[in-house]
Structure formats: structure tokens, C-alpha cells
Image (cartoon, rainbow, N blue to C red):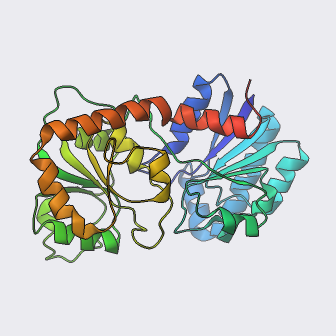
């Protein structure tokens, strides 16, 4: 089977498109990658002068790739840049159309996508399925991300030098929670927060580095952490939907504290493979408890790591996608 994989070029810390390409290749499929980001200075100028014109140009470019490579399946991650006319043309040419949307539940896909034109639609949230059925998605499927074991893995001999690590983008709720937590514990932060927090914020001394980080840099940091703090940006707004850190930290055999989401109980066993909290007010006590118990942390982290390798790699995700779409074998 030949896939035309359309990837979003703007994802910096989670280049899931390349992980997907690698997984499909490993499963024996052909993959043609179309990166919708501007490829050169001329395209950057096009985008700056007229964004819609740039999108039209890139969609024409996509159809040229289809004509040249003759794929069987069009598979887009996010798919924000593909308009209805392009999708209709892909379907006219006989391609199966698949979208994997990963911004739920805080940024719903119907704002951007002609959902009815996708043959299959996958989301990182089970809870948003009723919304998508309302917008004429025949059957939304839950498909979270996973890990690439070549990137997200334990690094033997790495010293756990940080008590608590948080890696991720800024969000006001994250800032509020971490501000409270540093009153009790040492927290190391990495992420593009510099322009979002005040110049005299007490968080500034806790940053290992401001700015975006690579998956490899994140994996090293998780290996150096006694505790990885996971806090969804939709904490206490939606009870469903899971983020990539859930799997990436466990793939590094890191001990993880994560806010509760409905899907997690089907992915990891609470108290055995992950520790969940309902309210951030629980964090100081949880951190005190587990920082004093390295053997317990190691046991839980090791069990999460084993589960992740068994069930939560990108190959597992692509196998599930192929099964749902009837593309196995």
C-alpha cells in the first residue's frame, strides 16, 4: 500500500509525522511525505504576502505529487491546510482519505476541516466523539499518539539529578500550578515560556533553558528526572483526551505524575504504572511521598515502560489505524 502522508511542518517538540512515516515503513508500506510548511525563501514570501494564496499553492503542489506518485491512501496529520476542493479531487482520483486530529478537546477539528470528506477520522480523545458525529463524521475513532523507542527510551547510567521535571509549552494553568509547587519542591522547567511570564516571575530561576526542545533533549531530561510532572493544558476543563507526554515519559522509564483523564485507565494501570491526581493541590504531598521512595518510583516506572513497549509505540498506533481502515495484510 502506498501512502501520501501530509505532515504539519510547524510541530517542533513532537514531530509525530516522521514517527508515523517510520512506523508505516517498518510495517512494509510505501510512504510519500508531503510537508505543508514553506520549503524555501520564495514560499516564505508567498505565505507572508497572502496566506490563503500560499495554502492554495501548496494544495496544488499536493495534487502534483499525487499525479506523480499515484498513492492509494491520503493520510493527513491535523489536516488544517487541506480544503474541501482538494479532498474532493483526492476522492475523485480514488484515494482513501484519513485524518488524525491531535488537538482535542481544546481545539475541535470542525472549525478547520471538511470532516464529511474524510473516509476515516481519528482523534486523541474519546470524549469528543459525539461532537464529531454531529458534524457528519460517520465513526470517530480514538487513537492517541505513542513513542518511537529509538528516541523515547531509558538511557542507562544517566543520573537522576532533578527532583521534578516539567517539559512543555506555556499555559496559564500550568504556570499557576507550577508556581504553587515550587513553594514546596524543586522543579526544573524547559519550554517556550520566556515571553509569557513576567520578568520578575519566581519561575525564571527554575528554567533549565527557555525555548523549544527536540524529542531527544526531552528524553534525556526525562531520564534525569526523579519525577516527571504531566499537566494537560485542559486540566479541570475537560475530563478526557490525552497528550503525548503520557507515553513519552513512560517510554523513557520515568516515574510520572499525571492529571486524571478518562482514557488513561484503559492505557495504564493507576497506582501500578502511573500515579494520577484529580487536583493539583495533591501534588506537594504526592511529590514528598514519592521523592522519599526511590524503589517504589522505580517499580512503577518500570511497569509503565513495559506496558508502553507492549502497547503504545507508533507502530502499534499505525497497526490500529490500518485495522480500522481495513488496510491490514
Against 217, is 84 above or below?
below
Q: Nearer the viewer, residue 82 or 111?
A: 111
Q: Is 131 left, or right, of 210 in this rendering?
A: right
**Residue at (88%, 42%) from the top-left corner?**
94
| Residue 160 visible in the picture | no
Q: Nearer the viewer, residue 53 or 177?
A: 177
Residue furthest to the right in view is: 92
Q: Position of residue 5 (x, y in %)?
A: 66, 41
Count of picture labels: 0
Q: Nearer the viewer, residue 97 or 135?
A: 135
- Name the image quarter holding the N terminus: top right
Picture quadrant of residue 320: top right
Against 77, is 216 above or below?
above
**Residue at (55%, 49%) from the top-left corner?**
40
**Residue at (12%, 43%) from the top-left corner?**
293
Q: Is 14 left, or right, of 142 in this rendering?
A: left
Q: Nearer the viewer, residue 58 or 306?
A: 306
- Name the image quarter holding the C terminus: top right
Q: Position of residue 309 (x, y in %)?
A: 43, 30
| Residue 125 visible in the picture | yes
Picture quadrant of residue 81: bottom right
Q: Is 17 left, or right, of 236 in this rendering?
A: right
Against 8, is 34 above or below?
above
Q: Is 237 left, or right, of 178 in this rendering?
A: right
Q: Position of residue 95 (x, y in %)?
A: 83, 42
Q: Position of residue 46 (x, y in %)?
A: 62, 62
Amino acid at each position: 500500500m502506498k501512502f501520501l502522508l501530509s505532515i504539519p511542518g510547524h510541530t517542533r517538540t513532537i514531530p509525530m509525522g516522521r514517527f508515523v512515516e517510520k512506523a508505516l515503513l517498518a510495517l512494509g508500506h510505501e510512504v510519500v511525505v508531503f510537508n505543508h510548511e514553506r520549503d524555501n525563501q520564495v514560499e516564505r514570501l508567498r505565505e507572508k504576502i497572502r496566506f490563503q494564496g500560499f495554502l492554495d499553492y501548496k494544495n496544488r503542489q499536493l495534487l502534483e505529487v499525487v499525479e506523480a506518485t499515484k498513492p492509494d491512501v491520503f493520510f493527513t496529520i491535523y489536516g488544517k491546510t487541506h480544503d474541501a476542493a482538494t479532498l474532493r479531487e483526492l476522492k475523485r482520483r480514488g484515494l482513501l482519505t484519513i485524518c488524525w486530529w491531535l488537538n482535542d478537546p481544546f481545539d475541535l477539528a470542525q472549525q478547520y476541516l471538511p470532516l464529511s470528506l474524510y473516509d476515516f477520522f481519528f482523534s486523541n480523545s474519546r470524549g469528543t466523539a459525539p461532537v464529531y458525529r454531529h458534524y457528519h463524521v460517520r465513526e470517530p475513532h480514538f487513537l492517541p499518539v505513542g513513542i518511537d523507542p529509538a528516541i523515547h527510551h531509558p538511557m542507562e547510567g544517566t543520573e537522576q539529578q532533578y527532583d521534578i521535571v516539567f517539559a512543555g509549552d506555556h499555559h496559564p494553568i500550568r504556570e499557576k500550578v507550577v508556581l504553587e509547587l515550587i513553594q514546596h519542591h524543586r522543579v526544573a522547567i524547559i519550554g517556550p515560556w520566556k515571553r509569557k511570564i513576567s520578568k520578575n516571575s519566581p519561575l525564571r530561576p527554575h528554567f533549565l533553558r527557555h525555548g523549544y526542545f527536540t524529542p531527544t533533549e526531552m528524553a534525556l531530561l526525562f531520564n534525569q528526572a526523579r519525577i516527571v510532572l504531566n499537566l494537560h493544558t485542559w486540566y479541570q476543563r475537560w475530563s478526557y483526551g490525552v497528550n503525548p507526554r503520557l507515553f513519552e515519559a513512560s517510554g523513557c522509564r520515568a516515574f510520572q505524575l499525571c492529571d486524571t483523564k478518562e482514557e488513561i485507565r484503559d492505557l495504564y494501570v493507576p497506582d501500578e504504572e502511573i500515579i494520577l491526581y484529580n487536583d493539583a493541590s495533591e501534588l506537594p504531598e504526592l511529590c514528598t511521598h514519592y521523592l522519599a521512595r526511590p524503589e517504589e518510583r522505580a517499580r512503577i516506572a518500570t511497569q509503565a515502560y513495559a506496558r508502553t513497549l507492549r502497547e503504545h509505540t507508533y507502530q502499534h498506533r499505525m497497526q490500529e489505524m490500518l485495522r480500522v481502515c481495513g488496510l491490514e495484510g
